[in-house]
Image (tube, rainbow, N blue to C red):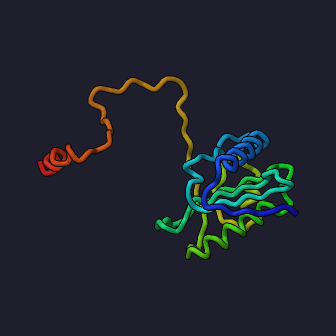
Amino acid sequence: MGRLEEASTLTDLQLEKARKLAEICNKHDALDYLHPTKEMISHGHHFQFYEENELVGFLSFPFDGSTEMLDPQAFVIVNSQHRRKGVGRLLLDAAKESYRRMGTQRILLVSGDKSASGKAFAVAMRGVYSHSEYRMSLEGKPPEIAEGAIRLRQAVLAVLAEIQLKLLA
């Protein structure tokens, strides 16, 4: 069998390998939701499984125990050529041990609603369905901003007094 590696952050090369693996999985499963980003892997725990120096399994667990996240999220991807060989289970077991050491009792395994392999994996791991989230995408040009529409901007200290006055009025 291959080797399992754990890291709290990934190098640029490791991130690139994770992205390539995600592309392979997205293409094989006709999905478009696995996109590891620098922000996603900049903290927490990430598990990589290699067969002969090829990344064939990856689990990202972007939680380091420093926040009070109710159900830390994790996603796992395994190259289709290496599925049903225990790679996903090995990655998930490693993540479970990691989050138990941090005092976390539950983990939310994230899967796309159209991912038959993700659903099958969750069932095989004795996961319990919790909830679904919707994904929206804007097609075409965004509409013009309506007159009187609410506009959001980052507050700066200089306008704090103005905001307080409006709230008190």
Q: Residue at x 52, y 68 (%)?
A: 65
Q: Residue at x 56, y 58 (%)?
A: 43
Residue 134 is situated, as x and y percent measured from the top left of the image, at: 56, 46
Question: How many numbered marks does the figure carry?
Answer: 0
Front in this rendered view, residue 88 or 8: 8
32 in relation to 127, above or below: above
Residue 75 is situated, as x and y percent measured from the top left of the image, at: 66, 56
Residue 103 is situated, as x and y percent measured from the top left of the image, at: 56, 76
Residue 25 is situated, as x and y percent measured from the top left of the image, at: 76, 45
Front in this rendered view, residue 117 or 164: 164
90 in relation to 101, above or below: above
Q: Residue at x 36, y 27 (%)?
A: 145
Front in this rendered view, residue 42 or 67: 42
When asked about the image quadrant of residue 2, the answer is bottom right
Front in this rendered view, residue 26 or 5: 5
When asked about the image quadrant of residue 127, the answer is bottom right
Q: Quadrant of the N terminus?
A: bottom right
Direction from residue 97 to residue 146 in the image, left or right: left
102 in relation to 72, above or below: below
